[in-house]
Image (cartoon, grey):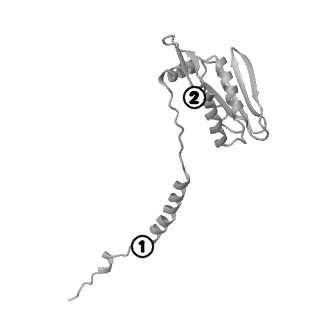
Amino acid sequence: MRYVKTRSSDATFDLNLAPILDIIVSIVPLLLLSVAFVQVKMIDTSVPQVVAEAVQRANEKSETTVTLKVSKDKGFTFEVVKNGKKTPTSVANKGKDWDVDALQAAALAVKQQNPEVFRVDLAPEADVNLNDLVTVMDKLRRTPDAQKIAFVDPANGQKVETELMFPNVLFANVIAN
């Protein structure tokens, strides 16, 4: 009689996990390093409800636009377009640095002439870095020395006073040339 030999080695095999471990060892440090360099920052922009409603109404039917051009070499230039008429206001640099106090004073003058406008279109040149833009936006947001600016609320016709000049900032030239 003949014995039939069965192969018991077919039922077992070795699983080679070395390639999978190589991938994990390579990818995990890469992901950890990339997460460490990504930081999200937020600027608190709480606005009173009356001002927020005025901003929304002004954005819907605004006839006046305010644009601020920012340049490291030339300084700041406000361009107010009201009823098709453009009025520029320049703020020169103080030496090699920006004169942000003069910028805030010029912004206050523009705001006092146009109290219904809460949006400014910011047009920085390519050489202006983000930290400088944040400084500029901070100066445009509130009046100096907590001065009040009055505007008429169109919903109820009452006079409202606020310290906010331009809380709504829109970047006019996001796409670089």
Which element is circle 1 on?
Answer: loop
Which element is circle 2 on?
Answer: loop
Quadrant in the rendering for residue 152:
top right
**Above or below 176: residue 38:** below
Which numbered marker is on residue 96? none
Three-letter code, disc 2: Pro
Q: Which residue is mark 2?
A: 167
Left or right, residue 145 beside residue 74: left
**Above or below 126: residue 30:** below
Which numbered marker is on residue 16? 1
The local crowd at label 1, few if under 14, some if 14 to 19, many if 20 or more residues have their Cα within 10 Å, is few
Three-letter code, disc 1: Asn
Which residue sits furthest top? Answer: 157
The residue lying at 30 percent from left, 75 percent from top is 11
Q: Is residue 58 visible?
A: yes
Query: How far apart are the two marked residues, 2 and 1, measured between alpha carbons?
Result: 61 Å
The residue lying at 51 percent from left, 24 percent from top is 52
